[in-house]
Amino acid sequence: MTSTSPDVTFDYRSDDGNSIVVYRWNTNERPRAAMQLTHGMGEHGLRYGEFARALNTKGIVVYAQDQRGHGATAKATHNFGSLGHNGWQMLINDIHLLVKHIRTEHSNTPLILLGHSMGSFAVQQYLIDHSNDIDATILTGTVALDLIAPAFNLDQPFDLSSLNTPFQPSRTDFDWLSRDETIVDAYVKDPLCGFGLDTESVKGMISGGQRMVDTQLLQQIRHDLPIYISVGESDPIHQQLAGVKILVDRFQTAGLTDITLKTYPDARHEVLNETNRNEIVNDILNWIDNKVLTLPITPKKS
């Protein structure tokens, strides 16, 4: 059985002096593409090992950083849930620093940027200024952030278990993540999972989300960028897909021409950890085959 542990762990220094931990899962042969994973709130990059190995089998080298305030990046300083001063913008800057690092290692290889949940909100905003630095984007567990802003009490830290309301009576506080009880139980037992952002960090995230409402800013995203959106229809964050469809409409109104939306009945927030994850991952791999691996290779400098 192939190990889901990363092959390499390293770190880099952020713009404000933090040490950001990164994991890399290698391919056996020269990579056909690279993927950068940007995880969600209250979790960490090592949870994506199974998905990374599936990508490896298709010749895709995978990188995942533990975001500031999360995982091994936060463990040294015990600042879980805190992005720090100006942390939301710094988190987006962190994404770009890793993009530049990957480009130094794989300059002639297509680069796919994937964001899940909170990570998808950061990736959406990253695209406004840096869409020319990547070749494709995947968003999972996503929504137009401004539409769910009213659900956040900006006077207190965000409680992730509040998303469990549609699944009452519930087995755990995190049934909203997946129908797979093994996945949910592992999440509950993981000391690096389950927390929300602190008040300052939530305010920064919500404020940053306002950029995605501005059509003129969205028009800065290159119009031919392939974007794949994968969501569960029972994910509580998007109001029965309404918030996802508005996000797609905003992209299209801004002139983007290559948007694919894929939804899955009964699937919840973490589509990559759902009971039908083999189907979901295969759909992603097929999209990469058709949309990314056929792209002409042009070296990029970030």
Image (cartoon, grey):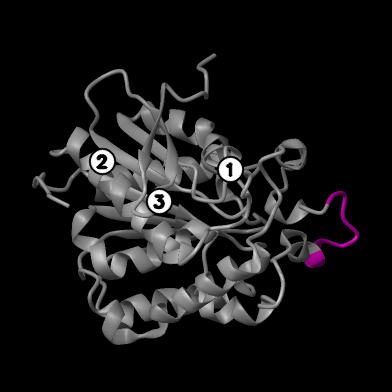
Examine the image and state in which quarter residue 258 appears.
Answer: bottom left
Which label was assigned to residue 114? 3
Kind of residue at disc 1: Thr
Residue toward you, 248 or 129: 129
For the question of whether residue 106 can be seen, the reply is: no
Kind of residue at disc 2: His
Q: Label 3: few (<14), some or many (≥20) within 10 Å?
A: many
Q: On the image, numbered disc 2 is attached to which residue?
A: 101
| Location of residue 261 in the rendering, given as x and y in whole percent from the top left corner | 43, 63
For the question of whether residue 43 can be seen, the reply is: yes
Does residue 245 sit above or below 62 in this rendering? below
Q: Is residue 71 left or right of residue 32?
A: right
Residue toward you, 52 or 263: 52
Magenta stretch mostly in which secondary structure?
A: loop
Quick one: label 3 or label 1, which is nearer the N terminus? 1
Secondary structure found at label 3: strand
Residue drawn at the location 45% of the way across and 33% of the way down: 52
| Location of residue 55 in the rendering, given as x and y in whole percent from the top left corner | 39, 33
Quick one: label 2 or label 1, which is nearer the N terminus? 1
Measure the C-alpha gap from mark 2 to mark 3.
16 Å
Q: Is residue 166 magenta?
A: yes
Dot in front, 2 or 1: 1
Secondary structure found at label 1: loop
Are the residues tagged 2 and 1 within 8 Å (C-beta)? no
Measure the C-alpha gap from mark 3 to mark 1.
27 Å
Residue bounds of the magenta highlight: 165-172
Residue toward you, 101 or 118: 101
Residue drawn at the location 41% of the way across and 83% of the way down: 213
Tell which residue pokes out farthest to the right in this image.
169
Quick one: label 2 or label 3, which is nearer the N terminus? 2
Dot in front, 3 or 1: 1
